Image: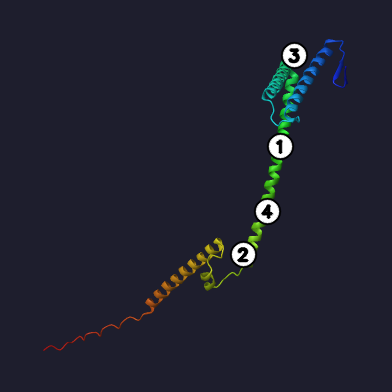
């Protein structure tokens, strides 16, 4: 049993287990007290602004030493626990893995939500772009296209160029066909007159 009265602690223990708990509490209290002393060195108000280096060094080294002792104490207890009751260690590892899996699943779900939001936004933007293209005139005047080619989007320019090339190819093919027809319709020259059977010889 521990009763705090100011800065004093009245501690009574009757069994070894009670004494062990008292040792745990005492080491934790000593570490806490050392941390407070170490913090007080940096936060206390003094007449001079400079802090004595030796005092700071002593308090910090004492706190680090106690922290290492506490770490060694807990590592020793964990080693004893793993030797005496290994199923508890396995259960703890399973709980840690379950917690980590749950955390990863939550993270993946948040990422999927963000991806779906971005996909919806891109779909809306694409639909808006297609609607604007449909609202534009289908056959713009060639003079306007030549006057402002840089103002049109790249896709529109490419489609216009493709249409122009197709129209030029069709016109060339029509000209070739017309020329072939003209060649077929040209009248042939008349045949020379036949020579008479009887030719007067001198």
* Residue most extreme to the top: 15
Q: Secondary structure at mark 2?
A: helix
Residue 173 location, x and y as percent? 44, 70
User: What is the quadrant of residue 15 in the picture?
Assistant: top right
Mark found first going from the N terminus, 4 or 3 = 3
Q: Secondary structure at mark 3?
A: helix
Residue at mark 4: 121
Residue 91 location, x and y as percent? 75, 23
Mark found first going from the N terminus, 4 or 2 = 4
Residue 2 is tagged as none
Residue 84 is tagged as 3
Residue 182 location, x and y as percent? 39, 77
Residue 133 is tagged as 2
Q: Secondary structure at mark 4?
A: helix
Cα separation, mark 4 vs mark 3, equals 58 Å
Q: Closer to us: mark 3 or mark 2?
A: 3
**Residue situated in front as seen by the camera: 151 or 65:** 65
Cα separation, mark 4 vs mark 1, equals 24 Å
For the C terminus, the image quarter is: bottom left
Cα separation, mark 2 vs mark 1, equals 42 Å
Residue at image x 63%, y 60%? 129
Q: Are marks 3 and 2 in contact (CB under 8 Å)?
A: no
Residue 31 location, x and y as percent? 76, 21
Cα separation, mark 3 vs mark 2, equals 76 Å
Q: Closer to us: mark 4 or mark 2?
A: 4
Within 10 Å of disc 2 (Cα), the crowding (few <14, some 14-19, many 20+) is few
Mark found first going from the N terminus, 3 or 2 = 3
Residue at mark 1: 105
Q: Are marks 4 and 2 in contact (CB under 8 Å)?
A: no
């Amino acid at each position: 049993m521990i009763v705090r009265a100011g800065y004093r602690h009245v501690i009574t223990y009757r069994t070894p287990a009670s004494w062990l708990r008292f040792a745990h509490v005492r080491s934790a209290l000593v570490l806490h007290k050392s941390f407070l002393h170490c913090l007080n060195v940096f936060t206390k108000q003094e007449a001079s602004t400079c802090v004595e280096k030796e005092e700071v060094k002593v308090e910090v080294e004492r706190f680090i030493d106690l922290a290492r002792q506490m770490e060694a104490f807990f590592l020793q207890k964990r080693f004893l626990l793993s030797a005496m009751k290994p199923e508890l260690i396995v259960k703890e590892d399973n709980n840690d893995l379950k917690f980590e899996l749950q955390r990863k699943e939550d993270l993946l779900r948040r990422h999927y939500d963000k991806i779906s939001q971005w996909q919806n936004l891109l779909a809306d933007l694409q639909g808006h772009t297609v609607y604007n293209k449909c609202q534009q005139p289908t056959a713009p005047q060639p003079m306007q296209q030549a006057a402002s080619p840089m103002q049109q989007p790249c896709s529109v320019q490419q489609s216009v160029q493709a249409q122009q090339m197709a129209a030029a190819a069709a016109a060339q093919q029509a000209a070739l066909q017309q020329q072939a027809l003209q060649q077929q319709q040209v009248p042939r020259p008349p045949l020379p007159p036949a020579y008479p059977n009887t030719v007067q010889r001198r």
